[in-house]
Image (cartoon, rainbow, N blue to C red):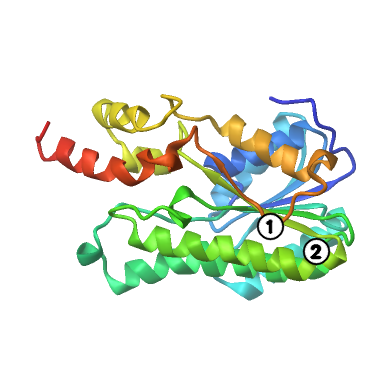
Amino acid sequence: MTHSFDFSGQAVFVAGGTDGINLGIADAFAAAGASVAVLSRNPDKVDAAVSRLLENGGKAIGFAADVRDYEAVAAALADAHMQVGDIDILVSGAAGNFPAPAMGLSSNGFRTVIEIDLIGTFNVLRAAFEHLRKPGASIINISAPQSSIPMEMQIHACSAKAGVDMVTRVAALEWGPLGVRVNAVLPGPISGTEGMARLAPTPDAEHVVARSIPLGRYGTKQEIADCCLWLASPMASYVSGATIPVDGGWALGGASAVYPDLRRLFSGQH
């Protein structure tokens, strides 16, 4: 864990913070002394995440709610505010994704990803607004390279994450005068995540993806968390409205090419 940042006495709320990249972010803020609230729609995952954070010495509470349900999200944030006070750092990272070609994707499948990623992000930010520390709060949305890089099999995620980046920029414009900073982090291929297990489910597929990254390797959840720690810290006090790739250079070219390579791999074309 990274201990070079000190968030003692600060309250952090992580939507989607019960597994993957988002749990890694919650872990990092807890290790840095913050009180951390996590939210997920799965009560069992909420309980497991809170237990993990407490066992690792953090201060944690959890809420079960679906980010698509505004009233449930608003109730959770109000409860968190009552327990930990003004929210200093808000991380919105709930997401849904799966590979599917446009003609193999149902309207319901497209809508589901839009609702979780884009509408969910808006719901979290909108419901949190009244509970944010003003001035001083830092909001971090978890986006993806698909927000600006068209990728095969990702028409739903590309559309949703493009919207997330615009939510980030508009909120930064509107809330900046109140002293609230809003930024987005765009993780590339990160090891040990459900998303990469779906994108590259075999060792050969993992090699194809790693080869498409200029740095030649997957990133780690800690590397994403480190960027979030920096964004929330005084060292980034003049950074707002930014969408920051943390992807080993993947968005420079490999992100748009990886799906054709994977398709050739799985169809036996080498």
Q: Is 56 situated above or below 186? A: above
Q: Mark 1 Cα within 10 Å, few/some/many (few <14, many 20+)?
A: many
In this rendering, would 41 be left or right of 265? right
Q: Mark 1 or 2 closer to N-term?
A: 2
Check residue 256 in the rendering and tell me which mark sits there, or answer none: none
Asked if disc 1 and disc 2 are in contact, CB closer than 8 Å, the reply is: yes
Residue at image position (50%, 37%) is 247
Residue 215 vs residue 225, the one in the foreground = 215
Q: Which residue is mark 1?
A: 241
Q: How many marks?
A: 2
Q: Amino acid at mark 2?
A: Gly
Q: Give the spatial CA distance, label 1 vs label 2.
A: 9 Å
Q: Amino acid at mark 1?
A: Gly
Check residue 176 in the rendering and tell me which mark sits there, or answer none: 2
Q: Position of residue 240 (x, y in %)?
A: 73, 54
- The reply to whether residue 115 is in sight is yes
